[in-house]
Image: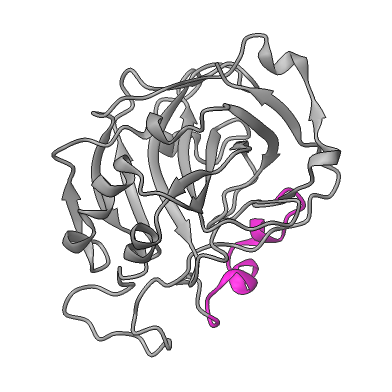
Amino acid sequence: MSWGYANNNGPSTWGGSFPNAGGKSQSPINIVKENVQCDATLNKPPLVCKYGPKASQYILNSGHGVKVHMEAKGCGLQGGPLEGNFSPDNWHCHWGATSEEGSEHTIDGQAYAGEIHIVHWNSTKYKSCEEAADKEDGLAVIGILLKIGKAHGEMQKLVSLLPQIQYSEAKASIPKGIDIGKFIPGSKIYYTYPGSLTTPPCTENVTWIVFRDPIDVCEEQLAAFRTVLVYKEGDNAPSDGNEGKVVKCFRPVCALNDRVVREGKAK
């Protein structure tokens, strides 16, 4: 099945072809601050995020959004809620039709204009992201909330490449590099909980690390994402009312059920 974010193939339909989407530990969620548990064990040792400008290899239009593939060598996560080392596979963005929505996670019911996800796999136990993808302890994803404010320098490097990947499956190299580490908020306070991928197959094997404080991007940067297309070059635009553009690509929040959200601070 071809999934997406339109009425005929959007999140409400995913459970029909991807049973995990109907599970009890799905993501994203609404994080209620007063229910978050401060956990000192998350700082023994603290979470460490290590990246660099050469880690981002190339940018791809996935047909669902924009994805940046990463080189795992010398980069990754360790400490905090994680056991072992987690290497990066990709980072990608979620956004809405307007800047009043677009983030996947919400905090106290507040949605943000967008959200960056950095996807990692357990490289201590597994040999590749593909091998780790369906394992219980296979994945960890960082979530970074975006709000409208001043332009972000590293984000602009990505935005400048979007004209090269307008059509689905188009990709482009990143000659200047993008340092994803510069998207980490200054406070480094994060929420963590067990959840799932927010896109099919929605496997429930993700340790989520969502930074509390959003970072700024400007309206023009976010609007540029809404120009990428869901169809391949040479194909006809689908009659989806959006001229084939990815005007929104976020999943609504899911029930927390009996899960606990904890708070820690990265080093």
| Residue 224: quadrant of the picture | bottom left
- Magenta span contains residue 159: no
Position of 224 with respect to 39 (left or right) is left
Q: Compared with residue 60, is residue 8 higher up or lower down, i.e. above or below?
A: below
Q: Residue 120 at x, y = what percent?
A: 47, 33
Q: Which residues fall within the magenta stretch?
A: 7-26
The colour scheme is: one colour
- Residue located farthest toward the top when viewing the structure as drawn: 44
Q: Nearer the viewer, residue 116 or 186?
A: 186
Position of 80 with respect to 76 (left or right) is right
Q: Residue 154 at x, y = what percent?
A: 31, 40
Which residue appears at 55% of the width and 16% of the height?
Answer: 267
Q: Residue 188 at x, y = what percent?
A: 57, 26
- Magenta span contains residue 18: yes
Position of 123 with respect to 257 (left or right) is left
Which residue appears at 23% of the width and 67% of the height?
Answer: 166
